[in-house]
Image: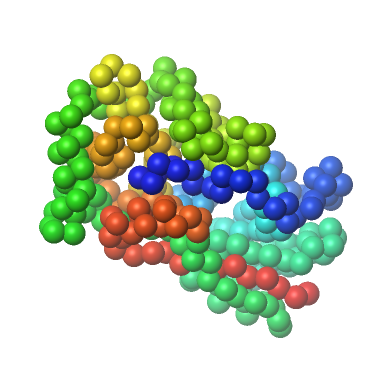
Amino acid sequence: MDETGCCTLNSEPATDYSGIDISKVDFGPFAPVEMSDKGMFNRLFKAVNPQISDLTFSNLIMWRHMINFRVAWFGGLACILAIPREYPPYVYAPVGDVAGDPGGFADAVGEICGFFSTNGWRPLFRCVPIDVAPQLTRLFQSCECEEDRDFFDYVYLASDLIELRGKKYDGKRNHIKKFMKLYDHEYVKLGPEHIDDCLRIMYDRCVENDCGCLRGHDHACDRKPSAELLEHFRELDCTGALIKVSGRYEAFTVGEALNGDTAVIYIEKANTAFSGIYTFINQQFCEREWAGMTFINREEDEGVQGLRKAKLSYHPVRLIEKYTISCNI
């Protein structure tokens, strides 16, 4: 949830496009992502210096049950599979030393295609970075490559989000001034002792928005994935913060370093009854925790128009393009 005050995913249940019975899938070398994989993934991601928010171990842990993340390793390259309810099965492009071993990349793609063929699926690659897309498409005689605007990452200058300078940020500064004037507030760094408060904040927001998750459609919002991240907060490399208003926690946020110069924000939830609280926690979190970074990646908007409007209102310095590639084999 962002400044819009609405859940990031559709409030109504998504169509079950995949129609996949997980129990009947031949997963072969693809194994579930587990917390014990942290060291291996962290070494991998550190080596490849990822730019897209999808390529962090925290992201995999956060969404591993919702979209059934699994991983297979081919020649040192990680092939990350997802079988969500609302989309057909897909895989990320192989992650690793792609430039240094193009032959290994092609071999890994071949293994992926073999896996998809075994299960009777058409190979589908999602969240493919713009620099990897050509290397992937040239491996197929026939494929379709489309930009996936709903999953472009929004990247901002950290200094912009901290300082909010200039006329274009007049509204943001006014929101913060109003919040600080109206409410007795406190910034608190997130610790394990605050997890229950974070869960309460998320639940209250879902009640406020009549979220589909309250009717058993867990895939209707990001509350369960966010709870998964919070459950393992101590073990992951995340940093978070809460805002206390009149003695009660009313907002929280969680992020981590994506690479050497960029932080990524995974969660931002707040009680919209407090005017300006989203703008306030965004600015404070960036200033107190990420002032040493050059960029802040605030992930995608998933096609939610209110969320897109909110993210654009902070004037990203760039959008990181991602592509969906479907292949004929």
Residue at the limit of the structure toward the bottom, as seen here:
141
- Given residues 82 and 220, the one toward you in this image is 220
Asked whether residue 241 appears in the rendered view, the answer is no
Left or right side of 118 for 215: left
Quarter of the image for residue 123 reads bottom right
Residue drawn at (51%, 34%), measured in percent from left and top?
Answer: 206
Colour scheme of this structure image? rainbow
Q: Is residue 296 or residue 245 the one in the foreground?
A: 245
Confirm whether residue 179 shows in the render: yes
Image location (x, y in percent) of residue 183: 20, 26
Percent across and percent down for residue 250 are: 35, 27
Q: Is residue 60 above or below residue 76?
A: above
Using residue 243 as the reference point, say whether residue 111 is left or right of it: right
Q: Is residue 97 above or below residue 171?
A: below
Residue pictured at 50% horizontal, 59% vertical: 303
Relative to 2, say whether 101 is above or below.
Answer: below
Residue 96 on image: x %, y %? 55, 58
Q: Residue at x 68, y 65 (%)?
A: 124
User: As drawn, is 169 to the left or to the right of 223?
Assistant: left
The quarter of the image holding the C terminus is bottom right
Q: Residue visible at 26% across and 39% down?
A: 276
Q: How many numbered marks are there?
A: 0
Q: Quadrant of the N terminus?
A: top left
Instruction: Judge left or right: residue 84 versus residue 287.
Output: right
* Rendering coords of residue 212 (x, y %): 60, 39
